[in-house]
Amino acid sequence: MNALNPAPLIRLSGIVAGYAGQPVLDGVDLVLDPGERMVLLGANGAGKSTLLHVITGFIPASAGTVEAFGAVRRSEADFRAVRLRAGLVFQDADDQLFCPTVIEDVAFGPLNLGQSRDEAYETARATLRSLGLEPLADRITHRLSGGEKRLVSIAAVLAMKPEVLLLDEPTVGLDPDAYARLGEILAALPQAMIIVAHDAHFMASLATCALLLKDGRGHRGSIHQHPHHHSHAHVHFEHDVEGAMALGHVGHDS
């Protein structure tokens, strides 16, 4: 690949993965290019969270190939390297935040990257500052609101300076202020993203492409704005997919 056509950050080919011998993903392909913000669509149980966990190696694929950052990834050591460059924000922030205070949670990643305590805490404070979250630095983590926990969990991932963000239902449980702040933060970030979300307005404001998971397969789509009496964003899939409009329509009134 050359500078005009950079290599994909992540490429999945023929991924099969599931639980207790039952595949949830049954031959999924995915390509994430630099700068893309991909939204993952699909019914409950379609495998959206599973796909993020396959990318990061938390769930092994029983077939297919995971290629990330220019190399095929197979072993746990391979995926540890992926997790340093692709930051996963879990659906439940309580699964991600475990230190007594916010600053300790955000500094945890940089410490594990080899920074000294002073360096890690400066990185954490700079990250919180850049997101407008510095007033939370010394707060007790478990006393934060759900929206505050969500924003801090994103700060904890960003402190590790990932090249890709993987966000699993980031808008769940947010109040209007946290929802708006999250949208502002993500829109301003340069990282490529894969976002699991059902919120039409949120997807339309952020996503540049889509992947619909249906019957174990992935169906690629692009997002286009259509000027009507109102502004609508729609997902267009490369092939007709039965039921795709119900799951894949992304629209909002402006």
Image (tube, rainbow, N blue to C red):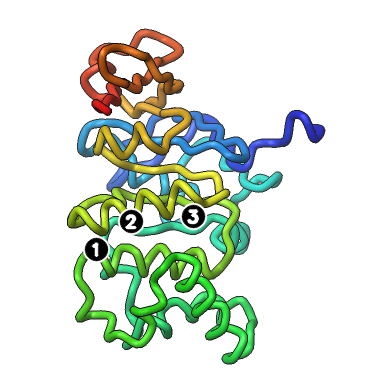
Amino acid bearing label 3: Gly
Asked if disc 1 and disc 2 are in contact, CB closer than 8 Å, the reply is yes
**Secondary structure type for disc 1:** helix
Q: In the image, is residue 44 above or below residue 79? A: above
Would you say 126 lies left or right of 205 here?
right
- Measure how far apart labels 1 and 3 are at the Cα level: 27 Å
164 or 121: nearer the viewer: 121
Asked if residue 175 lies left or right of residue 12, the reply is left
Q: Residue at x 62, y 40 (%)?
A: 34
Q: Dot 2: within a 10 Å radius of its alpha carbon, few (fewer than 14), some, or many (20 or more) residues?
A: some
Which numbered circle lies on residue 181?
Answer: 2
| Residue type indicated by callout 1 | Gly
Mark 3 → mark 2, Cα distance in angstroms: 30 Å
N-terminal of the pair, mark 1 or mark 2, is 1
User: Looking at the image, is mark 3 or mark 2 earlier in the sequence?
Assistant: 3
In the rendered image, the vertical position of residue 33 relative to residue 125, given as above or below: above
Q: Which residue is mark 3?
A: 57
